[in-house]
Image (spheres, rainbow, N blue to C red):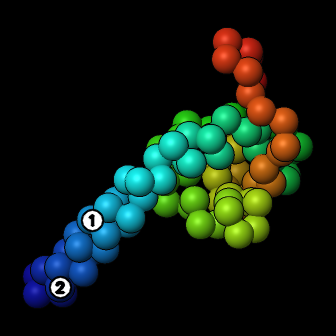
Amino acid sequence: MRTAAICLAILIPSLVIVFLVNIPRIERIRELASHRYICPSCGSRFRVKWFRLFFVRWQVETTDKATLTCPVCKTRDLCRREDSIYEEGERV
Ligand SMILES: [Zn+2]
């Protein structure tokens, strides 16, 4: 019980900090989300919702890769960001 309380006391403030740090960068995150990502295990290219990049933004910006779950094979792996940008109304 006590351990759970301590975990919450650490988890909640850190989530709040991540949230506050990212708010000014939402436009940047949306820009990153307009790119396609490539699954390393099945090779499919897919688009992610911007809020999925919320917690991995630093990873995308430093390595151009993001730990994402592939919508096709459901594998959670490092997906590379593709240069091409998803056009509005285009299907994946
Ligand atoms: Zn895949």
- Of labels 2 and 1, the one closer to you: 1
Circle 1 residue: 16
Q: Nearer the viewer, residue 73 or 91?
A: 91
Q: Residue at x 73, y 15 (%)?
A: 90
Q: Amino acid at mark 1?
A: Val
Q: Which quadrant of the figure has residue 85?
A: top right
Circle 2 residue: 6
Q: Amino acid at mark 2?
A: Ile
Q: Nearer the viewer, residue 60 or 71?
A: 60
Q: Residue at x 17, y 85 (%)?
A: 6
Q: Is residue 31 left or right of residue 21?
A: right
Pinpoint residue 11: horizontal percent, then vertical percent: 27, 74
- State the separation of the CA atoms marked 2 and 1: 16 Å
Mark 2, residues whose alpha carbon is within 10 Å: few (<14), some, or many (≥20)? few
**Do we see residue 15 in this rendering?**
no
Q: Secondary structure at mark 2?
A: helix
Pinpoint residue 66: horizontal percent, then vertical percent: 68, 58
Pinpoint residue 54: horizontal percent, then vertical percent: 49, 53
For the N terminus, the quadrant is bottom left
Q: Which quadrant of the figure has residue 31?
A: top right
Q: Is residue 18 left or right of residue 85?
A: left
Pinpoint residue 67: horizontal percent, then vertical percent: 65, 60
Q: Secondary structure at mark 1?
A: helix
For the C terminus, the quadrant is top right
Q: Is residue 60 left or right of residue 43?
A: left
Residue 47 badge: none
